[in-house]
Amino acid sequence: MPRQRSLYGTIAVAALVVLAATGTVVSGRLGGVAAAATVRAATAGCGTAPTLATGTHTIQSSGQSRSYILNVPGNYDRNHPYRLIFGFHWVGGTATDVATGQTVQRDVWAYYGLQRLSNNSTIFVAPQGIGNGWGNSNGQDVTFVDDMLRQIEGGLCVDTSQVFSIGFSYGAAMTYALACARPNVFRAVAVQSGGQLSGCSGGTQPVAYLGVHGIRDGVLNIAGGRTLRDRFVRNNGCAAQSPREPAQGSYTHVVTTYSGCSAGHPVVWAAFDEGHIAAPHDGGPGDSGSSTWVPALAWQFFTQFSSTSQPTSQPTDSPSPSQSTPQPASSCRVADTNNAWNTGLTSSITVTNAGATAINGWSLVFTLPAGQTITSGWNATFAPASGQVTAANMAYNAAIAPGASVSIGFQANHTGNTATPSSFTLNGTSCALA
């Protein structure tokens, strides 16, 4: 039996069920970060020496000493505004559990499996709840998030148009509370097997929303998860529908993207055949850090959104014509980085339009090294799973303006060769390698 299940003792489960059944709502206190505009900017921490580092940090919030674990990219660049993702733990869990992934699979499932997909592109935060939960009494946990944001944005270079939250169970409830109370702060949220346990102050504005829930959840019933989802179906102006869900005993999942949502506010619903678990996988019961499909889905959902921030500095020196020999220019440029472990890897690919005209619709073709087989991907469709692969655009990222980039990626199994492809072609044109 997966270790995740052991986190829920009889008392903890009973507490969650009682809270969900009574519809406990705790109001949050508006103010501070909540007043920020939807289109925001790079932070005060950009362009200066960082004052925060990877590790545990303490902060005073609502008259209490609170703590959080911070993970800063190893190649941190003070002039680059970073995506920021909060990961909230479940009832009885800890910030350390989230930061290490130790309850499912250490390192592989760190920050709900998103850290290994990020390839040093993201700052991660794992806050610690009072009593290992997120009761949000008098809005104190929302205020805690405000205070963490203020400290992190002051000490590091953060892209404030790219702030996200993900959580499971009680952590999902806290993520939902932030979607309600801080819609102009969080670009998107991922709510895994949640219920309305931490309140919903406000809750009338649109926020990009990903909901994930097990059809056999005996702790927080899927009916409650559907209710949380439907609030943002309405807020986001999506067309009402009844998404298909998998059959019991199938050990599969079904993902539905709602139609008609307002621009920039998609709603995606993923139902899976299992119970109250955080890392479901197709084909069998229980959690699996290396096989779960949830991290790739959440990463795809978060990274589909474009940044509104710009780099805080520009190169000051460029070679004059007398210093270099002009080279033929390619109309595209590709940067590809692999992050490998045991028999798995993730590939993060950035495609840049280096030409003078916009690209409308694209296909990126490359050949995987022998022994690599794609198991899931994000921000593109990938076919076939091995050999010569074509990555094709999604509807939301078909256009690439001159000088702009799109980021795509995939997770794959390997038999020992973890190299990246040696060449790429975009719409039939060979791309330069960054």
Image (cartoon, rainbow, N blue to C red):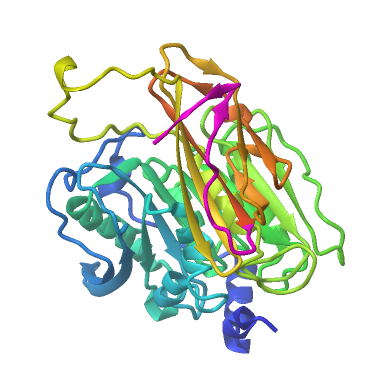
What residue sits 72% from the left and 59% below the top?
A: 223
What residue sits 53% from the left and 36% below the top?
A: 423
Left/right placement of residue 358 relative to residue 46 reads right
Question: Is residue 194 depicted above or below 1 in this figure?
Answer: above
Residue 174 image point, x, y percent: 47, 62
Left/right placement of residue 406 relative to residue 162 reads right
Q: Quadrant of residue 147?
A: bottom left
What residue sits 21% from the left and 22% below the top?
A: 324
Q: Nearer the viewer, residue 212 or 61?
A: 212
Point out the stretch of residues depicted in magenta: 413-434
Q: Nearer the viewer, residue 267 or 13?
A: 267
Q: Quadrant of residue 409?
A: top right
> How many labels were placed on the picture?
0
Can residue 415 be seen from the camera position used here?
yes
What residue sits 30% from the left and 33% below the top?
A: 309
Q: What secondary structure do most residues of the magenta stretch adopt?
A: loop
Residue 206 image point, x, y percent: 50, 38
Toward the top, the furthest residue is 357
Left/right placement of residue 289 relative to residue 385 reads left
Reply yes or no: does residue 260 show up in magenta.
no
**Image quarter of the N terminus:** bottom right
Residue 382 image point, x, y percent: 67, 40
Reply yes or no: does residue 423 show up in magenta.
yes
Question: Is residue 60 depicted above or below 166 in this figure?
Answer: below
Q: Nearer the viewer, residue 91 or 247?
A: 247
Can residue 25 be seen from the camera position used here?
no
Toward the bottom, the furthest residue is 10
**Image quarter of the C terminus:** top left
Residue 112 image point, x, y percent: 52, 64
Question: Is residue 341 depicted above or below 410 in this figure?
Answer: below
